[in-house]
């Protein structure tokens, strides 16, 4: 008997449901953590003070992009199970400046004060209802 590990046969691949569970958990974790970071960045700030800091604005846009990619990459079957998250809004989110700087700030402020908190509420609700979905 050899002490070397037994090679895996080609047909003994990881079951798809395990891979999907890991992907789903990672994406939900990214979605949640980036949303929390945005809420913390915006906490106690009005629109003007939030956009007065270029580094803060950059951090928020970076976190929004993480949320967008996480939503886009979430498996469709999981999105259907979590129907109260506005997946479409995240998938079509455009963080690039569109229109005047004022219009861009208004749009970003709406995302920060509406879409992000609403998404966090729903993700937390699903975390309570489906805790296994959030564990790797």
Image (tube, rainbow, N blue to C red):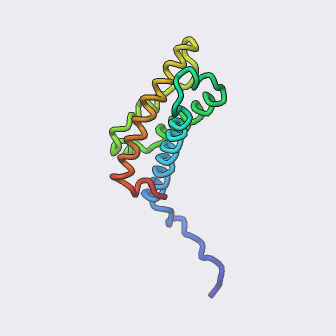
Q: Position of residue 13 (x, y in %)?
A: 51, 63
Residue at 62% of width from left, 30% of height from top?
56
Q: Give the answer, above or below, for where 101 lies relative to 57.
A: above
Relative placement, left or right, of 96 versus 83 is: right
Q: Residue furthest bottom?
A: 1
Quadrant of the rendered image containing residue 121: top left
Q: Position of residue 136 (x, y in %)?
A: 49, 58
Residue at 50% of width from left, 24% of height from top?
109
Relative placement, left or right, of 102 versus 120 is: right
Can residue 65 be seen by looking at this rendering?
Answer: no
Q: Position of residue 102 (x, y in %)?
A: 55, 13
Residue at 66% of width from left, 25% of height from top?
54
Q: Position of residue 12 (x, y in %)?
A: 50, 66
Q: Give the answer, above or below, for where 17 lies relative to 106.
A: below
Relative placement, left or right, of 122 versus 101 is: left
Residue at 46% of width from left, 32% of height from top?
91
Q: Which sits in the foreground, 2 or 37?
A: 37
Q: Which sits in the foreground, 80 or 107?
A: 107
The quadrant the N terminus occupies is bottom right
């Amino acid at each position: 008997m050899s002490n070397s590990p037994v090679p895996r046969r080609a047909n003994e691949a990881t079951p798809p449901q395990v891979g999907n569970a890991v992907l789903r958990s990672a994406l939900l974790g990214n979605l949640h953590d980036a949303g929390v970071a945005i809420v913390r960045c915006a906490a106690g700030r009005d629109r003007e003070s939030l956009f007065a800091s270029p580094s803060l604005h950059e951090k928020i846009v970076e976190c929004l992009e993480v949320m967008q990619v996480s939503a886009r990459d979430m498996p469709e079957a999981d999105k259907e199970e979590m129907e109260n998250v506005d997946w479409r809004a995240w998938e079509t989110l455009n963080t690039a400046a569109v229109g005047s700087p004022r219009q861009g700030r208004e749009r970003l402020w709406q995302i920060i004060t509406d879409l992000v908190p609403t998404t966090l509420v729903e993700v937390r609700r699903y975390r309570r209802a489906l805790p296994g979905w959030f564990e790797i």
